């Protein structure tokens, strides 16, 4: 199973950049940044000149390993359960107090459905748990990041992780599909409301990526997950990895996308062209 090991600096700088232009020395919060897509994004931001990356996650040990890999001079860890709005608020406030500003919020924390239930079998207690993390938690991150940016007059960028499930209908995992559709609505509404403050809000929608979360759900290794889903994509000769999603996140957070807001960037190797 994929694990979060300390990545030598020479390795992550070679893998993750630089190529795009971030705003001058931005301070960034990444929720769910201790593993998977969030971890890849942390390395990406570090390689592209972020002043400070704050990993906000409930996985304390893994988060500290990311800090060790990047270096404590430009990365820190903060325990944050996004289902607790006070923890989200405190993470944002602490970031501003410690580093003077907040430029980028990558709201990435989320989980997958633990069952294949359809509408007829929908377990609302389980749905509430999924909704609290995937939607309510993301709304709290957008809310408090935006408040900090408005107060500090920062023309910031907020990027939310959703999924190709956000623009599709599912035969199962109904609760998961519902939550990802909701994130798309959150992103679009926030982008419309925050544009007057110069704050951009976008989302990234990946197809299945071999993250620790999906590997655990499927009971497979990273390579097995990649082999399972590769036949469903139109673009051949490349396998979707966390780095590809981090590429999209960095673009949406960078100056290269300064006129893009309210957009959902799909990273699926052409899956949507087939299904």
Image (tube, rainbow, N blue to C red):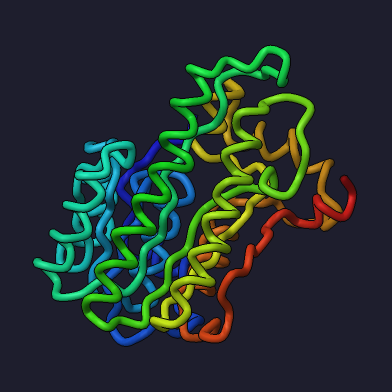
Residue in view at x 47 percent, y 71 percent: 193
Q: Residue at x 16, y 68 (%)?
A: 96
Q: Looking at the picture, how far across and down is residue 39, in whole percent?
A: 40, 51
Image quadrant containing the C terminus: top right
Q: From what the image shows, is residue 32 above or below residue 10?
A: above
- Depth check: give the residue in front, 218 or 99: 99
Where is 93 relative to 150, above or below? above
Q: Which residue is located at x 48 percent, y 17 percent? A: 125
x and y, in percent, of residue 240 in the image:
66, 51
In the rendered structure, the answer to whether residue 174 lies left or right of residue 251 reads right
> Of residues 210 and 105, which is closer to you in this image?
105
Residue 181: image location, x then y, percent: 63, 46
Q: Quadrant of residue 137?
A: top left
Quadrant hosting residue 72: bottom left
Residue sticking out furthest to the right:
274
One can see residue 250 in this view? yes
Q: Nearer the viewer, residue 81 or 233?
A: 81
Answer above or below: position of 108 versus 170.
below
List the single residue furthest toward the left.
97
Residue 92 in picture, x, y percent from top left: 22, 59
Instruction: Answer left or right for 223 relative to 24.
Output: right
Q: Nearer the viewer, residue 148 or 221?
A: 148
Looking at the image, residue 263 sits to the left or right of residue 73; the answer is: right
- Is 216 situated above or below 55? above
Looking at the image, can residue 62 be seen?
no
> Does 211 sit left or right of 267 as displayed?
left
Residue at figure coordinates x 31%, y 74% from the top left: 103
């Amino acid at each position: 199973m994929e694990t979060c090991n300390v990545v030598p600096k020479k390795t992550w700088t070679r893998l993750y950049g630089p190529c795009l232009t971030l705003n001058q020395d931005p301070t960034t919060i990444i929720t769910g940044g201790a593993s998977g897509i969030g971890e890849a994004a942390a390395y990406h931001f570090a390689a592209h000149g972020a002043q400070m990356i704050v990993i906000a996650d409930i996985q304390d040990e893994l988060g500290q390993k990311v800090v060790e890999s990047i270096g404590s001079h430009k990365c820190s860890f903060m325990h944050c359960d996004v289902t607790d709005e006070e923890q989200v608020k405190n993470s944002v406030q602490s970031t501003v107090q410690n580093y003077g500003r907040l430029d980028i919020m990558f709201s990435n924390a989320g989980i997958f459905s633990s069952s294949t239930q359809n509408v007829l079998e929908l377990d609302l207690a389980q749905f509430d748990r999924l909704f609290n993390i995937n939607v309510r938690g993301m709304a709290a991150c957008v809310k408090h990041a935006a408040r900090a940016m408005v107060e500090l007059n920062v023309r910031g960028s907020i990027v939310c992780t959703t999924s190709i499930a956000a623009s599709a209908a599912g035969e199962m995992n109904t609760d998961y599909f519902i939550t990802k559709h909701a994130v798309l609505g959150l992103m679009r509404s926030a982008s419309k409301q925050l544009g007057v403050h110069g704050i951009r809000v976008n989302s990234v929608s990946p197809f299945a990526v071999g993250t620790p979360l999906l590997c655990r759900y499927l009971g497979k290794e990273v390579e097995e997950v990649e082999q399972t889903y590769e036949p469903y994509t139109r673009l051949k000769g490349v396998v979707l990895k966390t780095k590809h999603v981090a590429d999209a996140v960095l673009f949406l957070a960078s100056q290269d996308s300064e006129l893009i807001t309210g957009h959902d960037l799909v990273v699926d190797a052409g899956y949507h062209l087939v299904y």
